[in-house]
Image (tube, grey):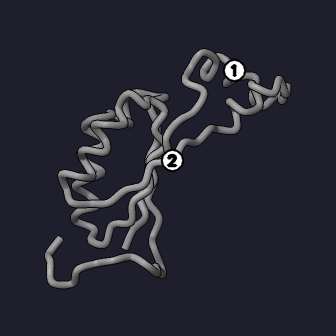
Amino acid sequence: MYALFLILNDIDKLDKIQEIFYENRCGATSVDSQGLGKILLEHHIDVSVFAGIRKLVEGNTPYNKTIMSVIQKEEKLRKIIDLINEELELDSKKGIGFLFVLPVIECHGYIHDKGKKE
């Protein structure tokens, strides 16, 4: 079982990303989120490490969306990652967002129909 996290900076793409999960019968949760760099800029905290990213985040949307999904099968995970990469071009277009996957060791409250094939 895997936990997929997508930090989506280009929130105009949110509907399309949600369609990818829905069309592949995969649940997902979206929450508003905000990166540390943007928070520091909004509070006028001058940290030298973040001075270089000021130009990258100023003028952008003040928040992003974090999309989380628990996916049971690796095949489905790979398919969803491929579709997200196809839509967002994460490896070639910088700043749109980033995606990472973590193993799920234990999960409670996750409803899975064992009779269905994913």
Tell me which amino acid carries mark 2: Val
Q: Name the residue under label 2.
A: 31
- Helix, strand or loop at mark 1: helix
* Quarter of the figure with the N terminus: bottom left
Which mark identifies residue 54?
1
Q: How far apart are marks 2 and 1 (CA)?
A: 24 Å
- Residue pictured at 33% horizontal, 34% vertical: 88
**Left or right: 116 in relation to 46:** left
**Left or right: 59 in relation to 96:** right
- Residue pictured at 44% horizontal, 59% vertical: 101
- Residue pictured at 49% horizontal, 28% vertical: 95
When the figure is inspected, residue 89 is found, relative to residue 104, above or below; the finding is: above
Quadrant of res 50:
top right
- Helix, strand or loop at mark 2: strand
Disc 2 residue crowd, few under 14, some 14–19, many 20+, Cα 10 Å: few
**Left or right: 89 in relation to 5:** left
Total marks in image: 2
When the figure is inspected, residue 15 is found, relative to residue 82, above or below; the finding is: above
Q: Position of residue 103 (x, y in %)?
A: 45, 70
Tell me which amino acid carries mark 1: Arg
Q: Where is residue 5 in the image (x, y as percent from the top left)?
A: 45, 53
**Left or right: 56 in relation to 92:** right
98 or 38: nearer the viewer: 38
When the figure is inspected, residue 40 is found, relative to residue 104, above or below; the finding is: above
Of callouts 2 and 1, which one flags the residue occurring earlier in the amino acid sequence? 2
The reply to whether the C-beta atoms of the residues labelled 2 and 1 are less than 8 Å apart is no
Q: Where is residue 118 in the image (x, y as percent from the top left)?
A: 18, 70
Q: Position of residue 97 (x, y in %)?
A: 46, 36
108 or 96: nearer the viewer: 108
Q: Mark 2 or mark 1, which is nearer to you?
A: 2
Disc 1 residue crowd, few under 14, some 14–19, many 20+, Cα 10 Å: some
